[in-house]
Image (tube, helix red, strand yellow):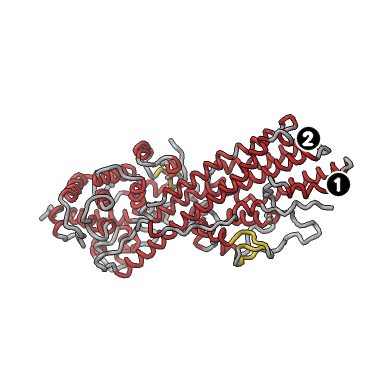
Amino acid sequence: MGVRAGTVLGVAMLFTGCASLPAPPVAGARSVVQSRSDGRPGALAGARASVARDVQQRGILTRHAVLGAVDQVQGSGAAAANGLSKLAASTSGIGGANRIFSRHVAYGSAQLPWLQNALANSRALADATAGIGDADMDLAILRMAGPRLQAAMFGTILLATWVDFLSLADVVLQRFHFYSVETLFADMNRVQQLMAPSLAALASQDPDQVEVVATAMPDLMGKLTLEFSSIREGVRVATVRGGQAMAAAQLVEMLTMLSAMKMSLARLPPPPAAPVALGPSLVMGSGGVMMGSQVVVSAEWVEMVRRLVQSGVVSLPAISAAVRIHAGQVMMAQANGDLPQGVRDALGDSPEVRGMRETGKAGAGMSEAPKHHVLPEEHRAWFEERGFRGAMNIDQFCVRLEQAHHQAIHGGGNWRLGRTSPGEWNRKIMDTLRDAETAVRRMLTRNEILEIVADNMKNYRIPMSFVPGRRR
Amino acid sequence: MTDGGAWEGNWKARLQERVRGLGFTSLTAFAEARPTASLVALAEELGKDDVAGIQVCMGLLAEAEQRKQLARFERDMLVRELSRCIPNGWPAVLEDPYRFPVAKALSLWIGDIPEARQERARRVMMTLLTNPPPPGWLPQGPDDELLRMLLPDEEA
């Protein structure tokens, strides 16, 4: 008989736990657009003010969505960390066998620091947007949290999966002695190698690498699911051959019953006799994304994610991958990477969102364009003194600029107009910031600096889209 | 999302073309019809995707140099920065949190004008901060009386 990899709920628990977001405190935010006291703004100014309010509102909601997502991923990460520490403390099972499996446990524990760091930085960035008087800058900083958040989301899925493999090994070592330790050791090495490139790419938190890994995750989860069931099948067969048919029959049940087990692997694909392509298809229902009568991801989660997608914090392909992993549709990767349009719409798909990706990515040739620090590097210490540290250090505020644009800003190329040669960007921005400090008679705050920088960026039409750059 | 489109091709010619297309003989005339609009708003009106505020600023400066109306250009820029940063007018109290928007308007304004004239502009900034105008003051154009006292036409 075929072995079914039990119903697996872990991933769903990773994200969809009861996430009700706190109501955003709109009233507490600083108003960007003040209404005119004389009431003469006219229709255009009125429309502009309303657009600005919308953008500001969006920033607040997006900030809450980022913080909500951080909390959820942190919760699942804590569960995985808890499982790891129990396994690490164990002296029998995986802790026995001459401790040859301790390296596998250690590999899991080694992921925790970067995961925690990615989440802490996402939170720091979201917190940093509170009180910035420029809604576009606000969103741009929230988008900086995106790759970190995405890395942590998918890193946590992989870590939880690894903990499942460790738990499987633990059970086998404790109870199923007919399966050789050497074979199990080789199995674990093989699985680790399967995961390692993706985990390393996620740990880099490099936006491009994270995106590639995220979109390829359903496929990887499919491979891991097959590995899991093939190891288990090997254990079952060895146990039957050893004359312990009863124990073998209990194996599946035992694995799913184990309380420590947070099984995050997806269901196995349908048996070969069944139609290949399709399990029940996903639809958007009132309870969330549904597969048949089962809720795959909750409506609250969809709502949170839609904000993140629409604001460009996380990408639709990455989120689609997460949903497919929840649904266990991991083996359909090659067949059809896209979710049904109704589900995509619910997750925030729109021409605007697709356009945002085109602009930000290689589609516009921008990923090749050189990066430039918006906050002049030679004044690093000055900015550090004013709060540009940690997740908000000046290396995080780089923009990609085409050559013509860059020349223009730095005073060369087609910049000159008549006899006028305005100062180059760096000197100009520093002059303005120093003049502002003179006028305000104290150090500027980080938010005030960002406000002034945002104004200059808009004036130069520099895209408000930051990428991390290198420290010289 | 904006992009580098503003700097492609001959943007000076593009600017002139758009201004004429709207029925104005010069960028200055176009801007004078919108005396309190920000540079970014002027740029957007001239080209939603391919004109930058800094280009409008440079175009206005070039025309002001030709007309020998640099002081008027400076007053014009200050009106626009003040309208944007302190739309409710000059604050009654020049302390936090009301002081920063004023500081921002004045420092950005200094950045708008030619370097050779920035020292004088800094003195004007200090004059305004030490002898503040009446609360609610918000000049509506370069002919504002107080502005003309602070930044008089040199040619006159």
Image point (33%, 45%), residue name: A445
Residue A380 placement (x, y as % from top left): 37, 37
Mark nearer the N terminus (1 vs 2)? 2
Q: Residue furthest bottom?
A: A43
Residue A316 placement (x, y as % from top left): 56, 57
**Distance in Å between CA atoms under marks 1 and 2:** 21 Å
Residue B64 placement (x, y as % from top left): 21, 55
Quadrant where the C terminus of chain A is found in the figure: top left
Q: Residue furthest top?
A: A98
Mark in the foreground, 1 or 2: 1
Tell me if mark 1 has few (under 14), some (14-19) or many (20+) residues whose alpha carbon lies within 10 angstroms of its own.
few
| Left or right of residue A272, residue A362 in this image | left
Q: Secondary structure at mark 2?
A: helix
Q: Are marks 1 and 2 on the same chain?
A: yes
- Front one among A164 and A422: A164
* Residue that badge 1 annotates: A246
Q: Secondary structure at mark 1?
A: helix
Quarter of the image for residue B40 reads: bottom left
* Residue that badge 2 annotates: A181
Residue A397 placement (x, y as % from top left): 42, 45
| Residue type, label 1 | Met
On screen, A249 above or below A282? above
